[in-house]
Amino acid sequence: MHLNYKILLHKAEEGGFTVTVPALPGCITEGDSLDDALAMAKEAIELYVEELKSRGEDIPDDSETLEYSMHLATS
């Protein structure tokens, strides 16, 4: 089974990155560097999905989600 997830990385004030996975509510992790944050995100997603499987729950993914960034000019 192949699952696809979009992740959001936010620069943390104290350094590093906080990572959220919108398709998996409450799936949040962090890393000291971009590479670390990505590795931690992969691990968090795997654990989250494993927990859903153990409960017999549906496993959401982002394969049908479109993504677009919109930039607005402000005055």
Image (cartoon, rainbow, N blue to C red):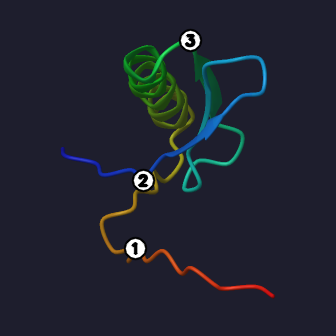
Locate residue 26, reporting x and y percent. 72, 40
Locate residue 67, reporting x and y percent. 41, 73
Q: Image quadrant of residue 65? A: bottom left
The crowding category of the residue bearing disc 1, from other C-alpha atoms within 10 Å (few below 14, some 14 to 19, many at least 20), is few
Marks 2/3: CA–CA distance:
20 Å
- The residue that label 3 is drawn on is 32
Nearest the camera: 32 or 26?
Answer: 32
- The residue that label 1 is drawn on is 65
The numbered mark, 2 or 1, whose residue comes first in the sequence reads 2
Q: Image quadrant of residue 11? A: top right
Q: Quadrant of the N terminus?
A: top left
Disc 2, disc 1: CB below 8 Å?
yes
The crowding category of the residue bearing disc 2, from other C-alpha atoms within 10 Å (few below 14, some 14 to 19, many at least 20), is some
In the image, taking residue 49 as reference, residue 17 lies left or right, namely right
Question: The residue tagged with tag 3: helix, strand or loop?
Answer: loop
Question: The residue tagged with tag 1: helix, strand or loop?
Answer: loop
Amino acid beneath label 2: Lys
Amino acid beneath label 3: Asp
Q: Relative to 45, is 15 above or below? A: above
Question: The residue tagged with tag 2: helix, strand or loop?
Answer: loop
The crowding category of the residue bearing disc 3, from other C-alpha atoms within 10 Å (few below 14, some 14 to 19, many at least 20), is some
